[in-house]
Image (cartoon, rainbow, N blue to C red):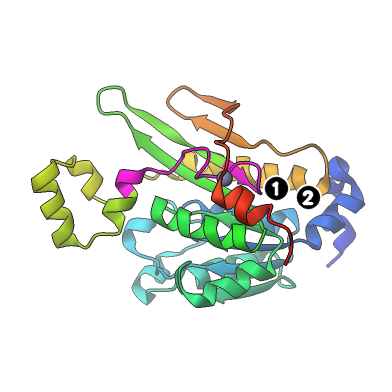
């Protein structure tokens, strides 16, 4: 295998120096589902060589509409998503190192791979898990790209997604991007949710769990995030703080929203003086 040939088309954009920076960047991907599997594949092709993967879940029939690298045999074998992603990364680059943690962000075992990494990709479905990951990334002062694909609307249906860069000057909390009602529901068990629905009339949709998720929309969101990672690591330009993809309109826009002052995560953890 000739390493010079492999990345020559990358180096046409950001040079051998940029390629070396990508190879020297340690990346943790949290969530290896519809978004994270795209991210893992693209980072492997981009030339990232050091990976940590975090996901507790297995490959199921209902994920086969969007899980990049998973095969039909993985459904019957109940393959872990971290194992399917590791196999895909190694099929692209056998020399890559891939550590796997088959648990959740809130588990103590997730701290070490996040602390080890230079950049974290959050590819999660639920806002409660985004908040947990924000806390761990802020405490460890990591550059954190949060990815989301989403739908909503009712009468005026919209669908698409977003990428937010959190590194101490704006995060999911101070940009007010987390759904408080959904997070409260995520923390309840099924009986509590049904009682809450009876008492407060919470919309049924909020109780159904994750909404639609489509491979091409996820692919755009993952591509936006990996491109912002690429410009950040190679120094091509400053990465965007927040990009919003409206697939229903066919647009990508850069948000100019200002974060709220006094954020515990940005000011109290990310930018706190080193101990
Ligand atoms: Zn913040």
Q: Residue at x 39, y 55 (%)?
A: 128
Q: Element under label 2?
A: helix
Numbered circle sitting on residue 32: none
- Mark 2, Cα crowd under 10 Å, few <14 / some 14-19 / many 20+, is many
In the image, the segment drawn in magenta is 164-182
Q: Please, is residue 60 above or below residue 261 in the view?
A: below
Q: What is the x, y in percent for residue 140?
A: 64, 64
Which residue does the numbered mark 2 point to in the structure image?
Answer: 233
Task: Check mark 2 vs ligand 1: CB closer than 8 Å? yes or no.
Answer: no
Q: Residue at x 60, y 41 (%)?
A: 170
Q: Does residue 176 show up magenta in the picture? A: yes
Q: Quadrant of residue 260?
A: top right
Prevailing secondary structure of the magenta residues: loop
Q: What is the x, y in percent for residue 105?
A: 48, 66
Disc 2 + disc 1, Cβ < 8 Å? yes
Quadrant of the rendered image holding ligand 1? top right
Q: Residue furthest left?
A: 198
Position of the N terminus by quadrant = bottom right
Q: Residue at x 39, y 45 (%)?
A: 213
Q: What is the x, y in percent for residue 229?
A: 70, 47
Q: Give the total of numbered labels.
A: 2
Q: Does residue 104 show up magenta in the picture? A: no
Q: What is the x, y in percent for residue 121?
A: 59, 55
Q: Element under label 1?
A: helix
Would residue 184 be visible to someone looking at this image? yes
Which residue does the numbered mark 1 point to in the structure image?
Answer: 229
Work out whether residue 222 or residue 64 is closer to the camera in this orientation and state it: 222
Work out whether residue 219 or residue 28 is closer to the camera in this orientation and state it: 28
Residue 45 shown left or right of residue 34 in the figure: right
């Amino acid at each position: 295998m000739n390493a010079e040939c492999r990345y020559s088309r990358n180096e046409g954009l950001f040079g051998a120096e940029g390629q070396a920076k990508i190879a020297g960047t340690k990346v943790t991907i949290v969530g290896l589902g519809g978004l994270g599997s795209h991210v893992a594949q693209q980072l492997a092709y981009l030339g990232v060589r050091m990976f940590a993967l975090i996901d507790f879940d297995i490959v199921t029939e209902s994920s086969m509409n969007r899980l990049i690298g998973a095969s039909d045999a993985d459904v019957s074998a109940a393959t872990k998503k971290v194992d399917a992603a590791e196999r895909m990364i190694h099929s692209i680059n056998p020399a890559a190192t891939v550590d796997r943690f088959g648990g959740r962000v809130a588990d103590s075992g997730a701290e070490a791979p996040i602390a080890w990494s230079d950049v974290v990709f959050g590819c999660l479905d639920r806002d409660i898990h985004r908040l947990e990951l924000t806390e761990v990334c802020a405490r460890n002062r990591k550059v954190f790209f949060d990815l989301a694909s989403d739908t909503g609307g009712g009468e005026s249906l919209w669908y698409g997604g977003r990428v937010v860069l959190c590194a101490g000057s704006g995060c999911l909390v101070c940009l007010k991007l987390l759904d408080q009602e959904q997070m409260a529901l995520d923390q309840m068990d099924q009986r509590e949710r049904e009682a809450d629905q009876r008492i407060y009339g919470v919309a049924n949709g909020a109780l159904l769990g994750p909404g639609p998720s489509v491979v091409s929309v996820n692919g755009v969101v993952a591509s936006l995030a990996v491109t912002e990672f690429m410009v950040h690591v190679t120094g091509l330009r400053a990465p965007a703080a927040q990009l919003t993809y409206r697939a229903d309109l066919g647009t990508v826009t850069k948000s100019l929203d200002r974060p709220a002052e006094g954020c515990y995560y940005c000011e109290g953890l990310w930018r706190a003086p080193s101990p």
